[in-house]
Amino acid sequence: MSRGFRLYVYTAALIALLLVLAGSILALWQFLGGWGGSPVIGLGVAGMALIAWGVHVWLAARAARPLTLAAAAERSAAARKAYLALGQLGALTALVAQALSAARLVFLRLLGEPEAAIGGRLMALGAGALIALAVWGFVRWTATRDGDLGRELGRAASWRRGYIYLAALAGAGLASVGAGELLRGVLSFLSRGLPADTDWRGPLALALAGLTVGLPLAIVAWARADRWAALAPAVELNTASRVTLRAACILVGTALTVLGTGYLLTQVFRGVLRLPVGSHWQLALAYVPVAAVLWLTAVRGARRDALLGGEGPQAAAARRIVRYGLAAAASGAFAFGLVEFARLILLVALGVQPVDATAAAEWWARFARAAALVLVAAPTWWGYGWSQQVRARTIGPAGDAERAALVRRIYLVAITLLSGCVVLAALGFGAFLALNLRSTEAVALRSALAGAGAAGAVALVWALVHGLILRGDARWPAELAAATAGETAETWAAAAEEAPAAAATADAPPQTAAPLAGPRQFDRATLPSLAETLQARPAPAFVVIDGADGAVGAGLLAALRSARTDVVLWPIGLNAAAHVAMLDALGGGTPPAVPADAITRAVAVLGPSDMLAAGGMGGEVTAELAGLLAETPARLLLLPPRDPRLRWVAAPDWPLARWVENAVIEAANAVDATAAG
């Protein structure tokens, strides 16, 4: 199946499937739920779409089911995985919508809603949910039957991850909003009772329905994602979709928790100071615990992912963006609170008093806001900023990467420059006031000086702190090298002092040890053996051969790169398209230089079995290449042929991903056998 025809088949099948789902649900609503209109329209749409879906699914199955490598490649194609993922997502969306509406009706009746006529509507929702569940189950069965569910490669895996993490996000969103609205309803009832003039049953029923449907959806989706991640932790735990979702949950949870806590503290201080309290305290008090649970759960999950699968480049970038972004926001809020505190203190020190009760209330309101900002922003800034500072001072590649990270440098430079600009502005404003001293009122002058002095002092501290951290990042490698050199010199000196005593206690006559604090000296007779010992053994190499579109070779190279980072990969594409696809699978950077004798020097050669016959792969295998493969001492690891005319008798009906997985295992065994020999 050509690429264009494949895209057409699966696109048409997906559209037809969604129309079958929508038409069936619409007909049920019109027949059982009492909607206006005749169900004939919905049934007609569903019937026509069902015929179109069956035709295109048959075309896809005809190309994907045979026991050939071409069929295995068809089953692992990105277009097919997109159809399966989007089909499951569409059916799951319809299922969740039906379940949410049905649960809302049930809770309305339980809460005593007199107009909750749930008979026909509930039957329509239940029937629609069953149809959506049946469609989802069929598409899921098709995906499972392909045999590579959870082990897809490249873009095919991205579709599966996008589907499952969108489902988890939808479940978490429904559960969070439902829990927050439920808590707000409880707080409203405790503070005001049940209002007779407002509709409280509808929002409460919707909140209960969201929590009831969203929480199981989030739990099941994350459990499925974790099960797939257990198959390949280093790959699955560092994918963009999972990392982005974790980072978004941390960002949203932290922001809502900090903002809600700050608002609540401000209202508490206002109440203590006998100032009017805001009207949104119930909303903040309801969502703070929900946001805190979301935040702590996401942080714990991110740490667990980093422990099990390591921290890849995408995960590290997301962590830095979230943590440095939150640290920058908390730093600004903390600085603003300190400026307000310092300003009020300077006003009192300069003898400035509020002119009336309104001005006094404004002073106390600013004090309440500043106190809340300091109490909330300070621990947030410390928690997110200091953790990254500790990581940057770690000895090793992790610390080096953190200090060199662009996000960290932008964070430090931006705060240092901004703080320096505030200091200069404060100094300039103070000089302006000094030059216009006679034309400025005394009270206004002292108020302005207090504001400029407070802002300048806090900004100066901020500029010095972050400037010193930036300077420390630049000097840390040199200081570490000096400290390491000092420790090495002390170790050599101690060894030189202990060597004579150790030699005197041995049976052999004592020998004079050369001083180790200076340049190391070697006996000429020992130099050849020492050179042989220190000479680095060449890394084992794999040759991957493929033609046509290069899909098999690209899959092999991606899997080998992920499984064995200690080997050299030499791709040999039998045409330009195959070679480009194989180089893309290796990622960016300089393409590997494939030597002329690569097939002879390699530990193993991997590729479709067509490569053994001259003229194979549509004539792309030359007689010279077939001769080299026949003479090479390397182990030949063969995948099923690409040519549909060639078949392996009694070969298992595996998808391409599983053949690649077994080829990687055999290649690793070849490396281990070579090393043991």
Image: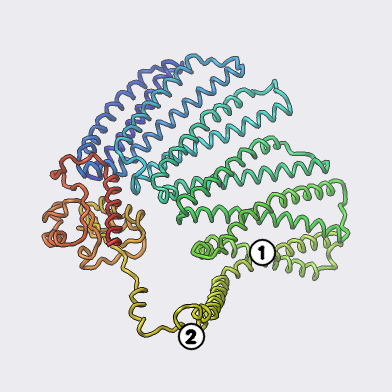
* Front in this rendered view, residue 665 or 273: 665
Residue that label 1 marks: 419
Amino acid bearing label 1: Ser
Which residue carries the number 2 mark? 512
Q: Residue at x 23, y 65 (%)?
A: 601
Which quarter of the image is occupied by the C terminus? bottom left
> Relative to residue 389, is residue 111 depicted above or below?
above
How far, Cα to Cα, is label 2 from label 1?
Answer: 62 Å
Q: Measuring from the top left, give residue 86's x and y in whole percent.
A: 37, 37
Q: Quadrant of residue 574?
A: bottom left
Secondary-structure class at tag 2:
loop
Q: Report which quarter residue 482 is drawn in.
A: bottom right
Q: Looking at the rendered structure, which numbered label has been put on residue 404?
A: none
Report the coloring of the rendering.
rainbow
Confirm whether residue 581 shows in the render: no
Q: Position of residue 90 (x, y in %)?
A: 40, 33
Please name which of the two marks, 2 or 1, marks the residue nearer to the observer: 2
Give the SS element for disc 1. Answer: helix
Asked whether, in this view, residue 566 is left or right of residue 98, the answer is: left
**Residue 420 occupies quadrant:** bottom right
Question: What residue is drawn where x is 26% and y is 46%?
Answer: 659
Query: Looking at the picture, how far across and down is residue 443, in whole percent?
Result: 86, 59
Circle 2 residues within 10 Å: few <14, some 14–19, many ≥20? few
Viewer-side residue, 568 vs 674: 674
Q: Is residue 424 above or below residue 547?
A: below
- Side (left or right) of 206 relative to 653: right
Instruction: Give left or right: position of 423 versus 478.
Output: right
Ranked by sequence position, the earlier of labels 2 and 1 is 1
* Residue type, mark 2 in image: Thr
Q: Whole-percent x and y of residue 376?
A: 69, 49
